[in-house]
Structure formats: C-alpha cells, structure tokens
Image (cartoon, coloured by chain):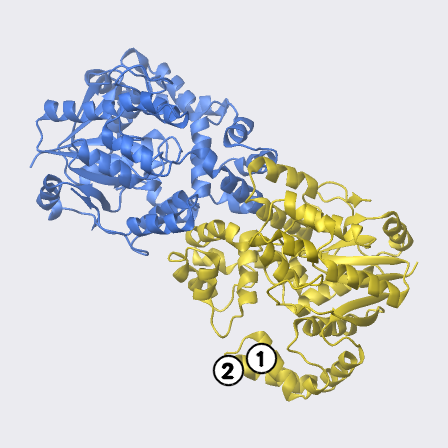
Chain colours: A blue, B yellow
Amino acid sequence: MHACGLIVEYNPLHNGHVYHIQQAQKLTGCDAMIAIMSGNFTQRGEPAILDKFSRTQAALAAGIDLVVELPFLYAVQHADLFAAGAVSILQALQVDQLVFGSEEGSIEPFQQALAVQEEHQAAHAHELKMQLELGLSFPEANRKAYEAIGLESSLDLTSPNNILGFAYLKAVGKLGASVHVDTIKRVQAGYHEQSISGPIASATSIRSAWQDKKKQEVKKAVPDVTLASLETENLHSWEAYFPLLRYLILTRSAEMLRNIQGMEEGLEYRFKKYIAQSTSFQQFLSLIKTKRYTWTRLQRVCVHLLCNTQKPTVGPFLQGAPYTPYIRVLGMTKKGQAFLASRKKQLEVPLYTQLKDGMHPIADLELQASDAYYSILAPKTAADARRQEISPPIFT
Amino acid sequence: MHACGLIVEYNPLHNGHVYHIQQAQKLTGCDAMIAIMSGNFTQRGEPAILDKFSRTQAALAAGIDLVVELPFLYAVQHADLFAAGAVSILQALQVDQLVFGSEEGSIEPFQQALAVQEEHQAAHAHELKMQLELGLSFPEANRKAYEAIGLESSLDLTSPNNILGFAYLKAVGKLGASVHVDTIKRVQAGYHEQSISGPIASATSIRSAWQDKKKQEVKKAVPDVTLASLETENLHSWEAYFPLLRYLILTRSAEMLRNIQGMEEGLEYRFKKYIAQSTSFQQFLSLIKTKRYTWTRLQRVCVHLLCNTQKPTVGPFLQGAPYTPYIRVLGMTKKGQAFLASRKKQLEVPLYTQLKDGMHPIADLELQASDAYYSILAPKTAADARRQEISPPIFT
C-alpha cells in the first residue's frame, strides 16, 4: 500500500489545505493519505484555535486517511526539531512520499540548496555562531549564514514555508529516511496575510477574522466541517491563557522557571521583571521582546511554561534520532486502518491507539499539555475533554 | 500607651466583630485597639471573601486603630501555629492585653485547662501519638488526648473558639509573652451556624447568604462598610479557584506536589488520583477526604498548593519562636500611628509599612499568595490589586 505523508497543523483546516491534500494525492497517486499533525499547541507557540480532535475530524472529512499526532514535545519547537519529529514518524510508518506546500513550488531548488548546505557545513556553522554572538535571533543569524555560503541563490529562505520545507529535506537527509520528497506551490494567500479576499486564505487571516466575528468571510475560506467546529467548540487563543501565564510567572521562583524547556540565558528574570505590569499577552511579549529573541521563540517558551515542560524530563528525547518514541493515532478511515495494518508488523516503535497515564514520559507530557490546554474551560467541559484524550481514536 | 490586641480574620467583618471590639475596649480600658488579621487566605484554608485591604478598611471603620497582617505562612496553619504567629506579633509590639471571643466566656476555665495540660504534658503527648497511630485526624486525636488527661472537666474543647482561645493561652505560655489574656463570651450565633436570624450572625452564614444573593439578610448582620465592599469588590470563593487548582494538580508531577507545605504521607497521590474526575472543589474534597484528614486540613494544603508554599523555603520559619520575623502594617488611624511610634524604638523585628520584592522570604511568600489570590481577576484588575500590595498602608 503506497502512502503519501503531509506534515500539518490545520489551525484550522481551510480550503488551501483541502487543495493541498487533493494535489498531493494526484501528484503521487498514493493509496493512502497520512497527516502528521500538531496536537493542541502549534509550532509557532500558540494554542490551536480548535482542539486536536476537531481538527482530526476535519482532516478525515477532507480526504486524509490517517491522522498521527506529532508529539507536543516536537510540535512546539524550532523548524529543525519540528521537522525531525515529523519525518521520523513518516520514517517509522514507512510512508513512501512526503509532499509539502511551499512558496517556491518546485523541489529542485530545495535539493540544490541542500547540496550547497552539505558542502559548506563548516562555513555555515562558523558564520551562524558569529552572527549569534552579535546578538541576532537564531532565524536571522541562520539566514545570514545561509547567505554567506551562497544558498540564497538557489532558494529564497525568507518565506516561511520554504524554511519549513528545507527543514524537512535536511531531516530526511539526517535521518537517512527513505521517503521521497516533493513540493506543491501554495496558491494565493501568503502565510501571514491578514485579510480574506477569496476561497483561499491563510490560517492566520482565518483565525483573526473569526475572532473579529467576521463569520461570512471565514465561511468563504473553510469547508463546512471547520465552520461547524468553530461555531460549536470552545475557541482557544493566547489572551484566554494570559491570567494563568501571569499567575505562573508571579508565583514560581526564577529557579523553577529556569527548569522550563527553552528558558535560557536568564530569560526567566526578564519574564519576572515585566509580568507584574503586563495586562495582556500581547503587551507582555512586546515588553520581553529583544533583537535576540523572536516573537515565536518567546511564545514557545510561554507554551512550555504553561504545560510545565521540564528540561530534565524532555532533555533525553531532544538529543537525536529516533526522535519519536511512539506512533499515536488520533483518527483514521477504513483505508487508514488498512494502511496501519500493512505497516504494523515492521513498526519499530510502539503504536498507541489509546493513551493512559504512565505509558511513556513523552505521552505523559502530551496529556499534561492537553490538561493545560483544557484548563481554561469550565471544569465539567475540561473533564470531558480529558476523557476524549484517553479514548480510542476517531474512526470514520 | 496601653494597647489591647485582638486576633481576627474579619471574613467579612460583621456586627459580632464590632461588638467584640467595643466590649474588649470597655473591659481593658486600653488607649489603642490592635488587630492581628489574616491576609487573603484564612486559617480554615479558604480564600477570604474580600481582600485584606477591604477588610482592613472595615476594621478601621469599626474601631480598630492598627491592623497588622498575620503572615500568610502562619495564618493558614493549624490552631497552634496560627496562635504562635499571632501571639509573637503581639509580643513584639508589646501589646498589653489580648482579648478573645469564646463560647466559654470566662478566662478561669482556660487557665485551669492550661494548668492541667502543663502538669500532664507527657501523658497528653503519649495519648495523642497513640490516637494518631489509630488513624484519627489531629484535632480528633488531640481532643481524645485532652480527655484522657481530664482537661474536658475544665473546658469544653469541642467549640472552635474555645480551641483557638486555648491555643492562644498555650502560645503565650510557650513564648513567655507578657501579654495579659482575657475572654469575652460570644453572643448568639455559633461559629458554623448556617442562617442569619438577627443582627448577630456567624461569618460562615453571612458568606453563604451573600453567595445565595440574600442581600437583605446580610444587611442585617454587617456594618455599612462591609456591605459596600461586598457590593463593589470581587468576591473570592474556593469554586472560583477550582480550575486553577485542577490545572496545577494535573500538570505538576507527584514530586513537585510533595514539596508543598502540608503535603504529607502520600497525599500527593490521592490528589492526583481523584482530580481528573472532579468537576468542583466540593466534589474533589469529598473524594480525597478520609478519617485521618479533616476537611480544613485538606483545604489548607490546597491553599498552599495554589500559593506555591515550598517546604524548603518555609521550613526554617516553622521550627520555633520567634515566629514572626517582621511586623507588616496594613492600615492605621492616627491613634494607631501614635501607638506604633511609642513602640518603634524597642521593636526587635523590622517594621514594614510597604512591601517590595526580596525584603524577606516570608514577605515574598506573602506577595506570592496575594498574586495567587488575585489571579482569578481580569489581568488589569489583578495588576491594580498587586500595586496596592506594594503601596503604603491605609491611613484613616
């Protein structure tokens, strides 16, 4: 059974995603479409607007056959770790192809860029270190280091989906994965575009339109299943978590904050210094932001603080391949089930169709992150959501 | 300047408290009335219905001249530590008299009971240990041990205000405080009485009536200043904190819970076992309650968890006298100020009229507890409340 993998967040699933699923299927001619999806928190360090189960439901309705969770630990990380986590799942599942969307749209420039990067690895590393020492943020320093080795003549690495795509190729190389990689050009809307002008819009603009109660605009850009979830489910945004974040920073010592994943270089003192006067998440981030820390990186640290991601617990799982210690199924169709059956015997990591406490430290962290995610709900709703977390996958 | 001290919670201040202030003044003829008051959390392990500043305002309006905070660490403790903390403040301030309200109403039975207890200290300790080993709660075991040494023929120790009063006498003895102790009979309402029948009602019944929106009943039992606060201030009750408590228990490891003050004998596992299914504070406490743990003791552990009271931080301050490492003024009248001036030179502990971060570990814990208390408010309101915490005292 041939399978095509997509690495996704679906925050929320919109028409552009549906188009990508269809095009990837057409391009590869695969029997089964597999999505490796972030759970309740996203790569950019935000609570997903809809929980993982609503988004799984939408994915299955849109043509995905199997939704596997990208563990929280790898989902809320910089591009390289995010990619390594996702690609290692594709590898474990022996998925044949990976198709990603990019601004570039054809795979050759990515391959050329990879060749350049591999050839000039030492020079890249040297330049990166220098730029970081000058106080630049990691993405900015990395971009300059790529520029220095001439990579930008092959590939534009200022576009976010090109960056992610390049990270996938690097991960495939590093992990020695046998998956064949291709790309599809993203249509119309830019990643960060703020308004909805047609049937294809960015997830960012859809979330923002929904928060501004522009339902008619959102309706143009998402399939019915997403619209239905947006209308009935509880919505999650950083501002809703801000009282909790504020509480944590005020009531935990600097020593406790320092144990949190991503809390480096005295950032804990910056958090403590600016929290008392902050009355919104936006304001807090503006206050702690410096040239060295990107907004995204700071958001990710806030997610790990909220979810209590402890360095000693997760450290061993961030050191190197294999990154993903298990496969957790969030949902599947009959075809997805058949695919799993076809791969089950050769799986080298455990397959979890139902989580419970104490299965694995990374699975426990997943439950912990979900408990944090559901904590803004009324206790009864939160208890129901927790029950779904430990129930069997969605089956359609 | 002669001063009379009262040890209070004023949760909220009602007509019975006003009567007690007046009677104590009449009885002692003192120049200044000093209240040692719990802050934002009470001895029984509950968030106070109104914050410390509203209650200070009410106390000053009702005839108190100086309100000193009983530090959070001593306020949310069993009767003996609560008493030790409060009496050590009276001692430091060289307050001449202490007058407490009791069901008993005259001081001789307390003195007789104290004599019995001192005479049979070893027998009491032996019996207490035995009863605890049988699995009784501390108060129940203690009551039986007192019974065994014949103390109940002097004093009825099933009444909560008699228990507290007896704790004050023991603390005065233990600390060698020179304060003269007397008692006034509480009028009418019992401590735990649930409904309001006249102008004197218990604080418990007033809180419960207010939560049931029975404003007319409450109006009968409290002075105008309390009613005004109840009408304009944010109200605090355990249920409002339950989502936060639930979040903490779900997202912290058993090891982290074990570091919390009062979390003993594997209680952390009981917390973790029952939290997921609990959808209210009442339900959670009913589930974790056993014969060994009183409701009050469990509530106190929950307060310390919420406020992140770490055993290693507070341990050294619970070992013995002097219990109170500083005097923190919450509010005063001109007369209160004159009293302070009269004692200032002989004070053996620092006098804080304005807290700031890093003054003292116990003061830092006070701020931390207040941050936890204000965390259920909108971020702007919480930031304002925090500003009041680090402002000079109320002066009327």
Q: Secondary structure at mark 2?
A: loop
Q: Residue at x 56, y 28 (%)?
A: A287
Q: Amino acid at mark 2?
A: Leu
Q: Position of residue A37 (x, y in %)?
A: 26, 36
Q: Tell whether B352 sits left or right of A161.
A: right
Seen in the picture, residue B123 relative to A78 is either above or below; the reply is: below
Is tag 2's residue or tag 1's residue first in the polypeptide sequence? Answer: 2
The x, y position of residue B395, in whole percent, is: 81, 44
On residue B59, the disc is none
Residue B282 seen: yes
Query: The numbered mark 2 sits on a residue in which chain?
Result: B
User: Which residue carries the number 1 mark?
Assistant: B141
Check chain identity for marks 2 and 1: say if they share one: yes
On the image, which quarter does residue A299 sit in?
top left
**CB atoms of marks 2 and 1 within 8 Å:** yes
Asked if residue A176 can be seen in this view, the reply is no
Q: Residues within 10 Å of mark 1 (few under 14, many from 20)?
A: many
Instruction: Choose top left, top right, bottom left or bottom right for residue B131.
Output: bottom right
The image shows residue B157 at horizontal and vertical percentages of 66, 78
Total of numbered circles in the picture? 2
Query: How many angstroms separate mark 2 from mark 1 (CA)?
Result: 9 Å
| Residue matched to label 2 | B134
Q: Would residue A361 be found to the left or right of residue A64 on screen? A: right
Give the answer, above or below, for where B73 lies relative to B167.
above
Viewport quadrant of the C terminus of chain A: top left
- The amino acid type of the residue labelled 1 equals Ala
Q: Nearer the viewer, residue B255 or B19?
A: B19
Residue B339 pos. (x, y %) = 88, 53
Seen at 15% across and 46% down, the residue is A347
